[in-house]
Amino acid sequence: MIHMRQFNKFEIENFKTLANLGVRYTTFQTYWTSLDKGYFDAIAPIRAFFLEEGIHDYSIQGQGQINKEYRDGYLLTDNLMIPAKASLYRPMTKKGDPRLWFSKLHKYTDADDIFAMFHIGSTLYIINMTKTNIAERYNSPENSPIKEILTTINRQKMEVSQELLRKFIKLYDNGHWYESEVQSDTGIGRAIETLLGIKMNASKDADYKGIELKSKRLLRNSVKNGLFSQIPDWDNSNFKSGAEIVQKYGYLSNGHKTLQVTVQANRPNAQSLVLDIPSKGEILEMLESKDKKVLNHIVEWQLMTLHERLSSKHKETFWVSVDNKFIDGKEFFKYSYIEHTRNPNIAEFDNLIMQQFITLELLLCRPSGRGDTWNFKIKDRAMPLLFPESLLYKLDPNSTPHRGPLPNI
């Protein structure tokens, strides 16, 4: 499998600009082979983006030319909006691996260029992030297709976030206490979904018109925020399943062997598990280590995969903080404040792992029978390092936030 190269500083600044404007995007890289053949693989992040945005579902598409689908598309350059119809298909060869192509793309790119792809409705737009200075075009006094399209998206996104904030202000209702939907860690999150009229969907977390929703209880010590869950790259790992890991490193709990622990960098836990990023900076490893000696390479993740997961999951998020209490064994909560984040600083993700601000929470072979999860979490005080451009909305005037003063709304 070919992995996308690391973004350079110019490209990172371009992606920051898109994120600041509230643009939900995915990325692809051009290669000599793709330019020569006239197609490139619709890799997992592209397929997920299409599915989440309601653009296309490759999993139900038939193979062959007869099942090929098209979407209107445009290539945005410094001063032009060039029609570039998108074709989405699965060939008859092999397993019909999903493919994508934009007409005329080969005339406006070189091999190894990075593109951002986003949409308005069913129309796709692509920008060459390697060659186009997006901030310069957007901030220019002169009109351009880039400025026009991005202004439209930004206006729509701000309308959604303000709409959602108004809903939370109404739900606050002078400190009204709501009952948790179920008595579990997920009870408050599920209750928030219900109050907002969001139907439960097992395939992904709560989502409001493209804004991710995360909740946390303020009374818990050492508050952490869940970023995302991501299984290891089993093909390149020494261990091939959670059950195999539990067999060697697990412990008995009520007669059942399980492994529910926190793993962090530079400090092995009781099971001698520790995270590390080798010097090449391409993968994250979970190792068995004692006395600073590596005894076993257990599993690994491609860092690019984790970066893409963070970027797609948290393009825009409402982190909802609540106070909670128990009455007759039932949990109740009221809203306190909301942290509104966009544009995660992807470049800092690796550093925050090595600084122990981002940890891995393993929940493997649980007695409840629930599936294995590999949750990456960030300590609350490190949120500004990963999300440097966040806004804090104070709902409860008497609340005490964890970090600094909060602006009133």
Image (cartoon, rainbow, N blue to C red):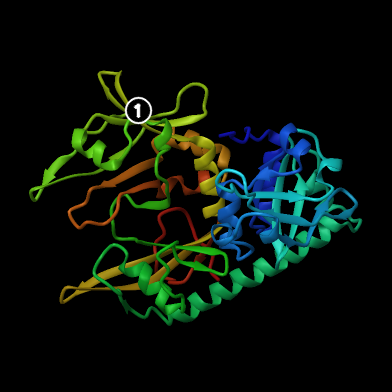
**Neighbourhood count class around disc 1 (C-alpha, 10 Å): few under 14, some 14–19, many 20 upward:** some
Q: Position of residue 32 (x, y in %)?
A: 75, 32
Which residue is found at the position 40% from the left and 46% from the top? 376
Using the image, determine if residue 182 lies above or below residue 221: below
Nearer to the camera, 179 or 23 = 23
Quadrant of residue 354 within the rendered picture: top left
Report x, y in % for residue 98.
61, 50
| Residue drawn at (42%, 79%) of the image | 195
- Residue 187 visible: yes
Pick whichever, 111 or 353, lies toward us: 111
> On the picture, is 118 further left or further right than 142?
left
Q: Residue at x 70, y 48 (%)?
A: 116
User: What is the secondary structure assignment of the residue under circle 1?
Assistant: loop
Q: Amino acid at mark 1?
A: Asn
Mark 1 lies on residue: 266
Question: Where does the image place residue 206, in percent across and percent down from the top left?
Answer: 45, 66
- Relative placement, left or right, of 136 versus 389 is right
Nearest the camera: 135 or 101? 101
**Horizontal and vertical percent for residue 311?**
56, 49
How many numbered callouts? 1
Above or below residue 94? Residue 393 is below
Instruction: State whether residue 315 appears in this view.
Output: no
Q: In which quadrant will I find the N terminus? A: top right
